[in-house]
Image (spheres, rainbow, N blue to C red):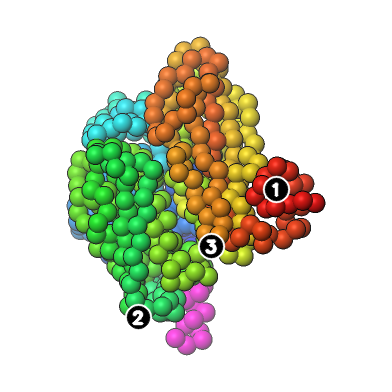
Amino acid sequence: MSGLDAIRHQVLWSRLTSIADEIATTLVRTAFSLVVRDNQDYACALYDARGEMLAQSTQCTPGQAGSTPSVVRDLLATYPPETLVEGDVLISNDPWIGAGHAPDVFIATPVFRRGTLVGFTCTCAHHADMGGRLGATDAREVYEEGLIIPVTKLFSADVENEPLVRLIRRNVRMADKVMGDIRAQMAANRVGAAGLVRMMDEFGLDSLEPVADRVSAHSEAAFRKAIARLPQGETRVEVFHELTDDAGDPIRIALALSVAEDRVRLDFEGTTPQVLKPINAVLNITRAYCVFPFIATLCPDLPMNAGAFRPVELSVPEGSIVNPTYPAPGMYRSLLSYFVVEAIMAALQQIAPDRTMAPSGTYPLWIQKFAGHDRDGRPFVTHYNAQGGQGAFRDRDGNTAVVFPGNIASTSTELFEHDGPFLVERRMLVADSGGPGRYRGGLGQETVLRSLSDAPVHAALSGGRLVEPATGMEGGQPGGKGRICVNDGPPFDKAGRVDLRKGDRVRLVQPGGGGFGDPTARAAEDIRHDLQEGYITPEGAKRDYGWTD
């Protein structure tokens, strides 16, 4: 690549990411629901006319962004390019095509320039409701989890598919909010389409395919170069989940990680078969979370496009919990898919310990769903998301109260109280919840939500590390466990549903991350700082660190 070509490549790449981020900004500013607007549970991506990913938004979730390629591929298989015209808009939330559960709705818009199809803009957003049983914490089939839409035209040549819109509105609890978010996705896609056409006009491009080939080749080469620096060979690990299979045994993720020159192969043979519980992770979501930990640990600044997915090869048994067959339920697939990341991190710890971190209290994802009628008698559906502590790193403490690896934001207290009949009575960090170590795990947090509704509120409550905490690494100690309870009732040991009456309190204690290294090696100034900030108690300092000052 000549110097001029290299400059042009970087300028084009910067423009592509800017367009993707402009899509995201438009989506957030026009979305109706709290989960998109505040939690930022979405992904935005650009594609060429072949369905090759050009770029994705800076803010996105790995699972959703990593699932958009399969949506665009299915779109092109269902609607070949010659069947698409300007003004078409396509929609799908099929878990086996997209991100693994019905609330994640994909909207794809074909982009035309001078009458020729040149690409697609695609957004995925987690919707407040897509029908089905609220939360479906005990679903045995995907049919219980909501309306499923295969790839279908929502608009044909700017004409709305009114029967489909009526079908959606009739099957969801908050029709205006759901359709508002769908239209926000459409608006965001239009902004991205206009940006792509402007870029092509400015640079004199007749096709996006050469650009896609160049940026993808660059990312693939950089990723392969990073992989080639890893020790060659195979390592095997098993990670056990506190949830159980249909026989009552702990769920097992078995992984063989092989590094051969500049390729990684992941084999999940021996992993627990799919279960009659809503925690199965379809292959798309498994693939996305298989790529993520390598990007995060080896080349975090890698431009994300089609080339970033090529060096990682998968062998995932069909019918396993990480590649289930239809109609396995998967509403809470993040309870499982995040542990794919933990398994890969455990394998990397054996071959590249300088790149890894202790297990986190941030997974699985803690997200609570509530539905009912507010103080004015109007129906509502809302979500509350708050997370625990990240595992400690080899050279620093874990981050506190973050969403990892999901990359969404925690819910704003004020916006949550505005969105539904709740008062957030308490939201605080939990002292001593970060796993002790030379580097401390991130802290968990405690939240108490009180229902203010005169009518019953239906709650679907979920979290993890309720039984087994995030373990430490290389002498580090476990973080604090999670806890979910209602009023003074017994703690939950898994996701569940409950009806809240006025005045009932939901107490959520998110777990802390594991520590890294021997706690007795922690620097005195770090212990003193933690005491001053209230991150550890005097009793914890003495018990966990031998502190006598």
Q: Tag 3: Cα neighbours inside 10 Å, few (<14), some, or many (≥20)?
A: some
Rendering quarter of residue 492:
top left
- Image mark for residue 261: 2
Q: Tag 1: Cα neighbours inside 10 Å, few (<14), some, or many (≥20)?
A: many
Name which of mark 3 and mark 2 comes first in the sequence: 2
Residue hosting label 3: 474
Is 469 in front, or is 114?
469
Q: Nearer the viewer, mark 1 or mark 2?
A: 1
Q: Position of residue 443 (x, y in %)?
A: 61, 46
Is 169 in front, or is 445?
445
Name which of mark 3 and mark 1 comes first in the sequence: 3
Dots 3, 2 in contact, CB < 8 A: no
Residue that appears at 63% across and 39% down: 430
Amino acid type indicated by mark 1: Ala
Residue 117 lies, with reference to residue 247, above or below; the image says below
Amino acid type indicated by mark 3: Glu
Q: Is residue 77 visible?
A: yes
Element under disc 1: helix
> Mark 1 and mark 2: span between their CA atoms?
46 Å
Amino acid type indicated by mark 2: Glu
Magenta-highlighted residues: 1-12
Residue that appears at 28% across and 59% down: 268
Q: Position of residue 335 (x, y in %)?
A: 39, 44
- Please tell me whether residue 8 belongs to the stretch shown in magenta: yes
Residue that appears at 41% across and 78% down: 231
> Mark 3 and mark 2: span between their CA atoms?
28 Å
Element under disc 2: loop
- Image mark for residue 541: 1
Question: Going by the picture, which residue comes out furthest to the right?
Answer: 549
Q: Is residue 75 visible?
A: no
- Please tell me whether residue 351 belongs to the stretch shown in magenta: no
